[in-house]
Amino acid sequence: MTDSVRRLSTGAPWEDRFGYSRAVELPGGLVLVSGCTSVVKGEISAGSPYEQTMTAFGVAFEALKELGLGREDVVRTRLYLTHARDVDDVGRAHRELFEDVRPAATMIIVSGFVDPSLVVEVEVEAFRAGTQ
């Protein structure tokens, strides 16, 4: 990749261990935020599926904020859940955060995450307008 690719590290415990960035901004304005869970400052902040979704998006929003973007710049979300029974709670959190933004969204049921107390992981893609 070229020097115009911007990479953001937040010091999350798995970033160095597994070799990834929390967010990557590509030339042209696309920003990709890696999967976020309810891990805050290296500690799992488990809770209900709704609470985990809100916390996970909070982690993603912090990364966007460091790059000068906000919730209103989000164009796509992906939500990964371990149980179909949590769809309504996770969907409610998504609606509360994005009802006026309306990004493209995908919700997928998966078999699990690196810690069994985690039930939700989210990915975010944002776009910086005017970057061509």
Image (tube, grey):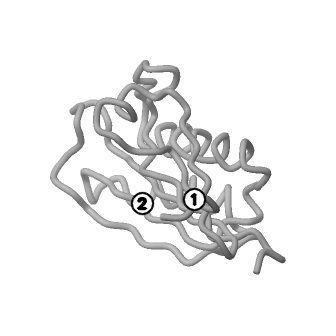
Query: Label 1 amino acid?
Result: His
Query: Going 53% across and 54% down the picture, which residue do you hit?
Result: 33
Q: Earlier in the sequence, mark 1 or mark 2?
A: 2
Inspect this view and state whether residue 89 appears: no
Q: Secondary structure at mark 1?
A: helix
Asked whether 51 or 105 is in front, the reply is 105
Which residue in the structure is indicated by mark 1?
94
Residue 39 shows up from this direction: yes
- Residue 41 location (% of width, % of height): 51, 20
- Residue placed at 22% from the left, 36% from the top? 114
Mark 1 vs mark 2: in front = 2
Circle 2 sits on which residue? 79
Residue at 25% across, 51% down:
82
Q: Which quadrant: the C terminus?
A: bottom right
User: Is 132 positioned to the left or the right of 36 in the image?
Assistant: right
Asked if the residue under mark 2 is in contact with the one under mark 1, i.e. CB atoms within 8 Å, the reply is yes
Residue nearest the viewer, comparing 1 with 54:
1
